[in-house]
Image: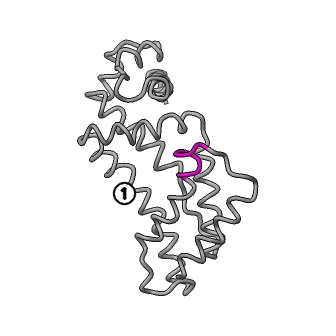
Amino acid sequence: MTVGKALRDDVTDAISAAFFEELAMTGYGRLSVDSVARRAGVGKAAIYRRWPSKQRMAIELISAVAVAAIEAPDTGSLHGDVREFLANARAALAHPLARSIVPDLLAEAHRNTELADALLSTVRDPRRAKAGSLVERAIARGELPADTDVDLCLDLLAGPLYWRLTAINTDPGPDYLDRLTDKLVAAFHA
């Protein structure tokens, strides 16, 4: 790796960190390329060399983090997969930046259809595909019937924990994930 490449990576990392800090502090609507550049300690040109617009920067950076944040591990059982998925989701949603950013982005997506469409295709769809593999593995193992409504299972999988951590902003107790896992697995079979 050359020194120039390392410096470019360092600048990109600084911009990324500054972007998420600004997004959490000001929200998407008030976020500006100027404020991100100032926080990152770079000129605006450094940002525009990487992304042609604020929206493109937001979509690429958010997508990279959001898709990587949720995994659908294969533990060998539906119960184990759901429990691990929920633990990963809880860790991602409990992050202080995520707690500020996620509700703001959802609100902004209602006002900005171009942003909404981009986030649906770059965040929601890949995340649902990852989570869908969890349900599909359970069907393949015979733990769920072949006619299982995968989309409904995914809605159930994401909804309660998201609601608890983001909408009502209440940290669940230590046994919440175990209780939720039991309920979700039972619902998937219904």
Name the image colouring: one colour
Q: SS class of the residue under badge 1?
A: helix
- Please tell me which residue is depicted at 53% across the width and 52% down the height of the picture: 162
Give the total number of marks visible in the rendering: 1
| Residue 81 horizontal/vertical position (percent) | 61, 68
| Residue at image location 59% in from the left, 64% down from the top | 73
- At x 50%, y 73%, the residue is 135
Q: Quadrant of residue 87?
A: bottom right
Instruction: Between residue 104 and residue 141, name the one nearer to us.
Output: 104
- The kind of secondary structure the magenta stretch mainly shows is helix
Tell me the kind of residue under disc 1: Asp
Task: Give coordinates of residue 131: x percent, y percent.
Answer: 48, 64
User: In the image, is residue 161 above or below residue 63?
Assistant: below
Can you identify the residue that label 1 sits on?
Answer: 125
Q: From what the image shows, is residue 51 above or below residue 174?
A: above
Residue 94 pos. (x, y %): 61, 43
Given the current orientation, which residue lies at the most extreme front position?
168
In-front residue for pair 34/179: 179
Q: Magenta span has 20?
A: no
Q: As displayed, is residue 178 above or below residue 190?
A: above
Q: Which residues are magenta?
A: 162-169
Q: Position of residue 171 (x, y in %)?
A: 66, 46
Q: Compared to 83, does 47 lie above or below? A: above
**Image-quadrant location for residue 74:** bottom right
Q: Nearer the viewer, residue 19 or 45?
A: 19
